[in-house]
Image (spheres, rainbow, N blue to C red):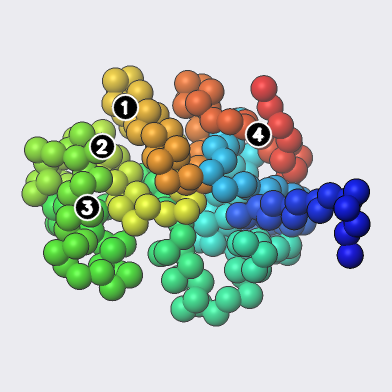
Amino acid sequence: MLNENQEKRPEPIQPVIAVRNLSKSYSNGVIRIDVLKELNFDLSNGETVAIVGASGIGKSTLLHIIGTLDRPDSGNLLFKGDDVFLYDDHRLARFRNESVGFVFQFHHLLPEFSALENTMMPALIRGTGKSPAARAAEEVLVRVGLKDRLNYRVGKLSGGEQQRVALARALVLKPLILLADEPTGNLDKANSERIHALLMELNQEFSMTLVVVTHNTELAACMSRRVTIVEGKLVATP
């Protein structure tokens, strides 16, 4: 019991994501390549991180493991203290849908569906009704500058417009964690700057943790922390 001259110490803040001793390798049957080697990494709620560096060092591999799209050879991925790779497939899929948004360099949209329909997909998968899902999708499409493209099939949109649909789809459920792999790689300077500003606005508005793999120095400079991968381990970079 504390006496009157003692102060209660605050509880340590638990990271939203904690990567512990993560290792990942690939093999073509002859050569084994160790991409990640006992890597450790903490992400705080609302933090913004850019993973930078040359191609082939493991940036996208790490991003995919954080998003549970790939599994490590060994190590742990803790979400609020729970090791998510101990979840069964159904629970893991629910975790991804409820907590993680993804933006890929190649947007993986369904070309036969409209921008609105593509953006609605995560909400429909969650079980949201069609009308509220459409309202949420329209709201975020307007925010990424596609108010006049809602009902266009994505196959009829430009590459930059398609990338903005992919960003809207990732944001429609206001995920706790947004993972983006070169989110402005296909955009011109004006639209890149617009997406940079939107990402930072949403980070502030929703305390959304943001991890971006990027070669874009302007986008990396917006992040509160920049890291790279050296010999399989994460190191800070200016």
In the rendered view, does 82 fall on the left or right side of 91? right
Q: In which quarter of the image is residue 50?
A: top right
Q: Residue 140 carries which label?
A: none
Element assignment for label 3 = helix
SS for callout 4: strand
Q: Which residue is drawn at 73% across and 35% down?
A: 235
Residue 124 visible from this viewpoint: yes
145 or 66: which is nearer to us?
Answer: 145
Which residue is located at x 33 percent, y 70 percent? 126
Please state which of residues 225 and 12 is positioned toward the viewer in this rendering: 12
Q: Looking at the image, do the residues carrying marks 2 and 1 touch, with CB atoms under 8 Å apart?
A: yes
The residue beneath circle 2 is 144
Mark-to-mark CA distance, 2 and 1: 8 Å
For residue 82, side relative to residue 150 (left or right): right
Q: Where is residue 3 in the image (x, y as percent from the top left)?
A: 91, 57
Q: Mark 4: few, some, or many residues within 10 Å (few <14, many ≥20)?
A: some
Q: Is mark 2 on a helix, strand or loop?
A: loop
Q: Measured from the top left, where is residue 143 in percent x and y?
A: 24, 38
Amino acid on which the number 1 mark rests in the picture: Arg
- Which quadrant is home to the C terminus? top right
Q: What residue type is labelled 4?
A: Val
Q: Mark 3 points at which residue?
A: 137
Give above or below for 146 relative to 16: above
What amino acid is at disc 2?
Val
**Residue bearing the label numbered 1:** 194
